[in-house]
Image: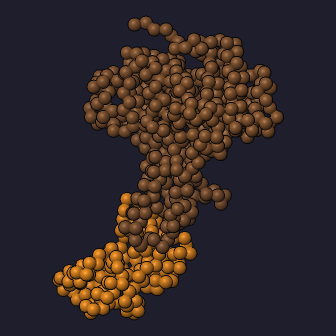
Amino acid sequence: MTVHQLSVFLENKSGTLVSVLRLLKKENIQLIASTIADTADYGIFRIICSEPEKAYSVLKEAGVAVSLCEVFAVALDDRPGQAADAIEMFAGEGISIAYLYSFLLNGKGVLIFRTDNAGKAAEVIASKGLNVIEEKDLSRLL
Amino acid sequence: MSYQKFFHPEESYSRSEIEALQLERLQATVKHCMNSPFYQERFRSAGLTPSDIRTLDDLKKIPFTTKQDLRDTYPFGMASVPLDQCVRLHSSSGTTGNPTVILHTKKDLEEWANAVARCLWMVGCRPEDVFQNTSGYGMFTGGLGFQYGAEKVGMLTVPAAAGNTLRQLKFFTDFGTTVVHAIPSYAARLYEVMCEKGIDPRRDTKLRTLVIGAEPHSEDTRKRIEEMLGVKAYNSFGMSEMCGPGVAFECPEQNGMHIWEDYYIVEIVDPDTLEPVPDGEVGELVLTTLKREAMPLLRYRTRDLTRILPGECPCGRHHIRLDRMKGRSDDMIILKGVNIFPIQIETILMQFQELASDYLITLETVDGNDAMTVDVEMKDMYIDDYSKLQALSREITRQLRDEILITPKVRLVPKNSLPKSEGKAVRVVDTRKKY
């Protein structure tokens, strides 16, 4: 029900982002979606990519501060209001979204998100019949 | 009104008068020390008795006393009087580092006030003055130490204590403050806020004299402070083990701090060999108290590095002059007048599961103020959770502040990103211009 996401801790120094991207390029790993959360002192670079486990070990070996975590990926029809309805389902159950980003995939909007209660979120997804994207679906598209 | 030049007759003693008094007091102090179980044992194991101290040179036979000794005998093991004769104690800060305790009898407090009063008098403080103390009170000896000394001079005292800069400025203008005690970085801060509020220190205040100490600072810093505030700024040296302020102080010549040799015997030793260094060379300051009742200290290694300024001072005092402190022979950090050992910081950091083992303490001057940044290496697994990272740096900051009494800037950094030298982690980088 979840996909792998890499979270990279970036110091606010020039060159840190490009050095991570170069490492991935070298291993022919493709980015599918990514986002940077910036703070005064550091950034968190979140990446959905092809071969996330390989990407993780590549970065790890290069000494990059990275963690591999699981996030939900839900596909929505390309119509206004879909995201609102989906998030409403979680809000209604008292589940908070820690972060969320989205991208378009074959005409569908995909929401990537992490909640404060993964177990409960999984129940909501199952019971409401949300269209979950699996990791293999992502890599197949590449 | 005209006043005498010297606050005490001892202040103008000749060298031979000083030395005669020192010998007499050293012998009395050594005898008195035999009331302390610690010194009894020290003398016994060194095969010494008080009668072996016949000349000032015999002082060298006595073993050194260290901060570790103070810690080992915490809290009262070094007292040379029964506790019921003590009326106050001052203790070093810190909850994880071993604290040290200095006990005082009524007479000790009286003599301490006398020493501070002599310093203040020397730089022209008189009963007509209004003295405002921006030091923290309580355990920090710069508070009560200057308080009693200033009262002894007869000044009107404003025990404003630390912080609340706007209130400090209001006191300046409302009470006509003429003398201020502040650490150098706070003096700069006072000026900054004056500028923000449109207060011209020369026009709107009566400030004339600034006592700056407790924080190492350069001659440039002093000049800058004098220029900013339109005052004369005098360097003060003290430490809680020697009561606090009042140990050594600049005279109007502003060239070295006279250390009161009727209170202390001064030695400067090589911190490695513990042998005396040649006159005028830098070494570790070692002090023997001559007037203390509750806790006399014999040959106390202060860990402060300095030198004796050669030559006579034109001011007419023959008490030797110490140069500005040149640093420490241990790893103690002095920040905003607060003494901090890196181990205190390390002990706090090591309690956090989320952190890897490396850290770096950076000390710098930011807008004229001392600032500390603590970079801490974090374990990788917490990276995705922003709120957890924020909470983590907040909690580290809070715990460090509780321990070292200063709020550092805490920065989370990736594992293995901190500098290493020859495989050994660098723990403290000090970029302040101090000496």
Name the residue at 45% across, 51% down.
B402
Name the residue at 64% across, 24% down.
B290
Q: Colour of chain B?
A: brown
Q: Quadrant of the C terminus of chain A?
A: bottom left
Depicted B196 relative to depicted B124: above or below: below
Depicted B5 relative to depicted B80: above or below: above
Name the residue at 36% across, 84% down.
A119
Name the residue at 17% across, 83% down.
A80
Q: Nearer the viewer, residue B223 or B207?
A: B207
Q: Percent position (x, y) of residue B357?
A: 57, 63
* Chain the render paints orange: A
Which colour style is shown? by chain
Q: Percent position (x, y) of residue B127?
A: 40, 15
Q: Nearer the viewer, residue A35 or A97?
A: A97
Farthest top residue in view: B2
Q: Is residue B286 left or right of residue A43?
A: right
Q: Is residue B259 left or right of residue B150?
A: right
Q: Is residue A128 left or right of residue B263?
A: left
